[in-house]
Structure formats: C-alpha cells, structure tokens
Image: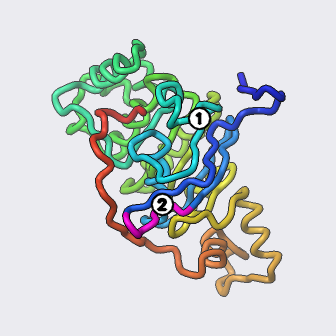
Amino acid sequence: MATRSTNGTEVPALAVKDLRKRYGSFEAVCGVSFEVRPGEIFGLLGPNGAGKTTTIEIVIGLREATSGSVAVFGADVSRNHALARGMLGVQLQESDFFDHLTLAEQLRYLGACYGTKPDAQALLASVYLADRSGWRLKQLSGGQKQRFALAAALVNDPRLVLLDEPSTGLDPGARRQLWGLIRRLRESGHTVLLSTHYMEEAEVLCDRVAIMDKGLIAAIDTPGALVDGLLATGFRRHEEVREATLEDVFLNLTGHQFEDQPIEQPAAGHRRRGGGA
C-alpha cells in the first residue's frame, strides 16, 4: 500500500534534497536532489567517481552527509535512522559475508540481525540458487555471488532496494540473468534504486534515469525522453546504427566522453556483514 502524506499526496520512496558530501576541499556530492517514486526502477547513471556510491552510502547511513536531507518513505534518515533503515535492502559493490557459513546460514544470520526469520530456501530459489543452499560463498561463480548478494538484500522484505553497480564484472549472460531478477523485484512490488555505468543497463531496466557526473545531476527523465530531447536539438550520430543513445545524452550534458574517473575517497567505516541495509 502506498504511503501518503497528511495532504493525501503519495510519499516518495526516496527523497534526496540538496545533498552534499565534502572531504576537505573536495566535494564528492554537490547538492543533488531527486525523488524515487514507489514501484519504479530509478537509475543513477554515471562513470566511476561521479558520486553515485557516495550518495547510496549516505542513504543507508554508511557515510554522514555534510548537508542536505534524505528520507525513506517519509522517514528522515538522520533523525529516524532505525525506521528508515528497516525499510531498506542493500546490495553494495563489495559485500562482506562469512566464509565459514553456508548460503542458507548466512541468510538466517542476516534475518536475525533484523529480528526476522526469513525463509532461506525460498530466497535462494528466487535467485536460482535453491540447489546451492549448503554451499559456501567461495564455491560460487561471479554471477552466483551477485545473485546471492541480491537474496541477502531481501531478508527483511524491504520496500526499497538499493543496488550499487550490481552487474559490474559479470559476463553478458550473467548480467542479463541479473536484469531479469531486478525486473521481478519491481513486479513483486519493490522499489529499486540502481546505480550503474552501463548505458544499456540503464536503458533496459530503468523507468527513469538521473545522469550524474562530477557530483552533480545533469538531468532526470525516462531514457526515451532523454534521447528524444537530444534528437530535438538536431543531434545525429555519425554512425547509422540508431539516431541517439543515452551515451550521446551524457556527452551532450557533461561535455566529455563516458569514461571512468576514479577518485580516492576515505573509507566509509565498518560495513556490517551481508548485503542487507
């Protein structure tokens, strides 16, 4: 059921307003604002170093914002952290799981951290790992590890699932299998915030996309609307593959090619074990 404010309007699944994060003189996130609507897959699209991961880590409480506000279904993350975090499930780029526990044991342990008793076998089955419940993480392939991390993010049945670069390092087949699981999350009523630097991933999965670069959001819209807006300026690609893509939109908005921009940042502090928030 949708959450509504006192005036009857639907409360955003995630509301980020004027968010900033500074490290000395360097500003990693430069006053970004966006809202994620309940039931959608919302993408943060940008290269490494754009501020996507920092934004997600602030949302889940791993980093403290310099200024600005974050609310999860109306619950302010800084003032009501426990309530907000209880509505979140998170798959980080690097999740810290126990080496000595089986997959099923890992999920039951994570559930206990939330005070719940998840059906570990059902969660594993939902990510096509039902026959691996007795395995340990080191026995899994890269794609299987990512699917398990997604199951771990769901142990508390979260309303909002945050996925930080979930398909990085996967081969095309494993990536598309993961995409199917992400679509199923939306179909089952979850809201998803997805960060990615893959143009195709954003186009295929996301209902709306925020193009992020150098700590700023350059535009927010549906992938189709962003491409149509660029075409309306008279832009045409030199190659006759298709008239424009999100990569062209990114270049037009930011002034440079879509490429990695690694930026060293301080460690986020200790991360709890597991993929959940």
- Provide the residue designation for mark 1: 72
Say above or below: 176 vs 46: above
| Residue nearer the viewer, 159 or 265 | 265
Q: Which residues are magenta?
A: 24-30
- Provide the residue designation for mark 2: 51
In screen coordinates, is 137 left or right of 86? Answer: left
Q: CA distance from mark 2 to mark 1?
A: 19 Å
Q: Position of residue 97 (x, y in %)?
A: 26, 34
Q: How many dots with numbers?
A: 2
Secondary structure beneath dot 2 equals loop
Quadrant of res 148: top left
Circle 2: residue type: Gly
Please identify the residue farthest to the bottom as the structure is shown.
Answer: 238
Tags 2 and 1 in contact by the CB under 8 Å rule?
A: no
The N terminus: image quadrant: top right
The C terminus: image quadrant: top left
- What's the residue at 73%, 68% (across, down)? 227
